[in-house]
């Protein structure tokens, strides 16, 4: 007597395919929601620091970190960095770097950002806030953004590195022009406490953004580079 094996019917195969499709759709949707949440987190953090920067300037008529009378007018300032005072020259100096670290103490002690930061000679978790990838932010006056133009120095907030290129590109599209070398949000190779993506010719890493060729001046959002950064230019 023969045993005949029964195969799957078309209806059973269709049901399996539908289930697989639903599972894949759920995974992709979940990844999309995670990406959107990370983008919103970065944008929210940038907006918060920008609001703090301009709020501090409006109250004290000085930039955070550069404020030369902070020890007299802001409570609980430490004496680690110039007695808690900047040099008052109208910019958050990158050299010496202490003003860019002192900025976070002045902002936090004046109540403009959450947390308490105490200035010291080097960045650490007690002196400097971090991005969602645990890399330090930097608030400073320099030209280390875009294609690094020393003649176009401005105050800027650097996001720090270790941000996936698709995240940084989406941030740029949502708040600016979507291009890494123009507008108010641009590429930045600032390392923070993590290794930055490799640099070529002093400009952007090819794995993060195109500096030439075709297309020119665009984020490489399909490459999958996980170590990029940007800067909000004020």
Image (spheres, helix red, strand yellow):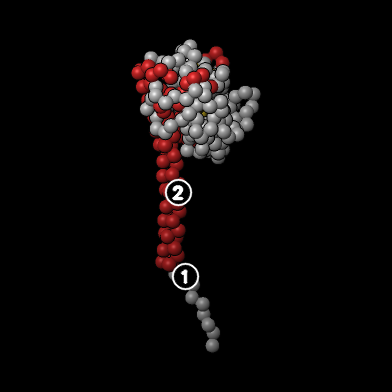
| Residue at 42 percent of width and 15 percent of height | 69
Please determine whether, in this image, residue 117 is positioned above or below residue 33.
above
2 or 1: tag closer to the N-terminus: 1
The secondary structure type at the circle numbered 2 is helix
Q: Nearer the viewer, residue 34 or 91?
A: 91
Kindly indicate whether the residue at mark 1 contacts the one at mark 2 (C-beta within 8 angstroms): no
The C terminus lies in quadrant: top left
In the picture, the disc for residue 28 is: 2
The N terminus lies in quadrant: bottom right
Give the image location of residue 3, x and y in percent: 53, 82
Dot 2 alpha-carbon crowd within 10 angstroms: few under 14, some 14 to 19, many 20 or more: few
Give the image location of residue 134, x and y in percent: 51, 37
Image label count: 2
| Residue at 53 percent of width and 27 percent of height | 120
Give the image location of residue 78, x and y in percent: 47, 25
Give the image location of residue 108, x and y in percent: 41, 28
Q: Does residue 173 appear anywhere in the picture?
A: no
Mark 2 → mark 1, Cα distance in angstroms: 28 Å
Please determine whether, in this image, residue 135 is positioned above or below residue 181.
below
In the picture, the disc for residue 29 is: none
Q: Nearer the viewer, residue 70 or 229?
A: 70
Judge from the rendering whether residue 57 lies leftward or rightward of residue 227; answer left or right. left
Please determine whether, in this image, residue 181 is positioned above or below residue 220.
above
| Residue at 59 percent of width and 32 percent of height | 196
| Residue at 40 percent of width and 17 percent of height | 72
In the picture, the disc for residue 8 is: 1
The secondary structure type at the circle numbered 1 is loop
Q: List the single residue furthest toward the bottom.
A: 1
């Amino acid at each position: 007597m023969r045993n005949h094996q029964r195969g799957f019917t078309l209806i059973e195969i269709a049901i399996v395919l539908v289930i697989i499709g639903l599972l894949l759709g759920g995974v992709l949707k979940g990844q999309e929601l995670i990406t959107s949440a990370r983008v919103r987190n970065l944008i929210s953090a940038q907006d918060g620091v920008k609001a703090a920067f301009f709020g501090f300037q409006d109250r004290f008529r000085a930039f955070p970190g550069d404020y030369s009378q902070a020890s007299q007018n802001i409570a609980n300032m430490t004496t680690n960095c110039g007695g808690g005072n900047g040099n008052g020259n109208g910019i958050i100096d990158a050299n010496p770097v202490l003003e860019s670290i002192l900025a976070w103490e002045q902002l936090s002690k004046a109540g403009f950002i959450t947390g308490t930061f105490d200035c010291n000679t080097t960045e650490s978790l007690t002196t400097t806030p971090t991005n969602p990838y645990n890399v330090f932010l930097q608030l400073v006056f320099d030209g280390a953004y875009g294609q690094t133009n020393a003649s176009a120095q401005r105050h800027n907030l650097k996001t720090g590195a270790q941000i996936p290129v698709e995240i940084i590109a989406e941030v740029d599209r949502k708040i600016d022009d979507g291009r890494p070398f123009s507008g108010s949000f641009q590429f930045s190779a600032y390392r923070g406490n993590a290794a930055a993506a490799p640099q070529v010719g002093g400009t952007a890493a090819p794995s993060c953004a195109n500096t030439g060729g075709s297309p020119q001046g665009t984020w490489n959002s399909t490459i999958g580079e996980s170590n990029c950064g940007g800067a909000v230019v004020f």
